[in-house]
Amino acid sequence: MTAARTGGWREQVQIAFAGGVTPDGLEAVIAAGADIVDVGRAIIDAPLLDLSMDVAE
């Protein structure tokens, strides 16, 4: 999320997280910056966006 903020585009997009979300881990996902948490059938058959990101220090 730091790269998104530094790049100036974080406010223009919503970040979604899916997969392996448990009630115990939900707060960590939100703290990491997720705007949307997809669980269960919400992500089945959803269209995919071919996206990759190179992270550099």
Image (cartoon, grey):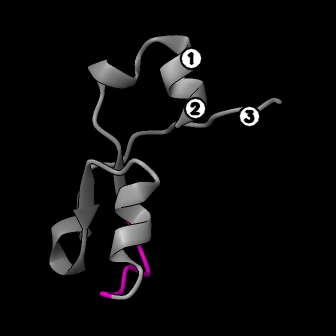
Q: Earlier in the sequence, mark 1 or mark 3?
A: 1
Can you tell which quarter of the image residue 18 is in?
bottom left
Is 2 located above or below residue 20 in the figure?
above
Q: Secondary structure at mark 3?
A: loop
Q: Are marks 1 and 2 in contact (CB under 8 Å)?
A: yes
Residue at 35% x, 43% y is 15
Q: Which secondary structure class fits the magenta region best?
A: loop
Residue 20 is a magenta residue: yes
In the displayed structure, does residue 14 sit left or right of residue 54?
left
The residue under the point 52% across, 37% down is 1
Amino acid type indicated by mark 2: Thr
Where is residue 7? Give x, y as percent.
Answer: 54, 13
Up/down of 41 relative to 38, above or below: below
Quadrant of the image for the C terminus? top right
How dense is the environment of label 1, judged by Cα within 10 Å: few (below 14), some, or many (20 and up)? few
Instruction: Examine the image and state in which quarter residue 28 appears.
Output: bottom left
Q: Nearer the viewer, residue 44 or 5?
A: 5
Of 4 and 49, nearer the camera is: 4
Q: Which residue is mark 3?
A: 55
Circles 1 and 3: CB atoms closer than 8 Å: no
Which residues are the magenta region? 18-23
Q: Indicate whether residue 44 is drawn in magenta.
A: no
Q: Which mark is residue 6?
A: 1
> In the image, what residue type sits under mark 1?
Thr
Q: Residue at x 41, y 16 (%)?
A: 9
Q: Which residue is mark 2?
A: 2
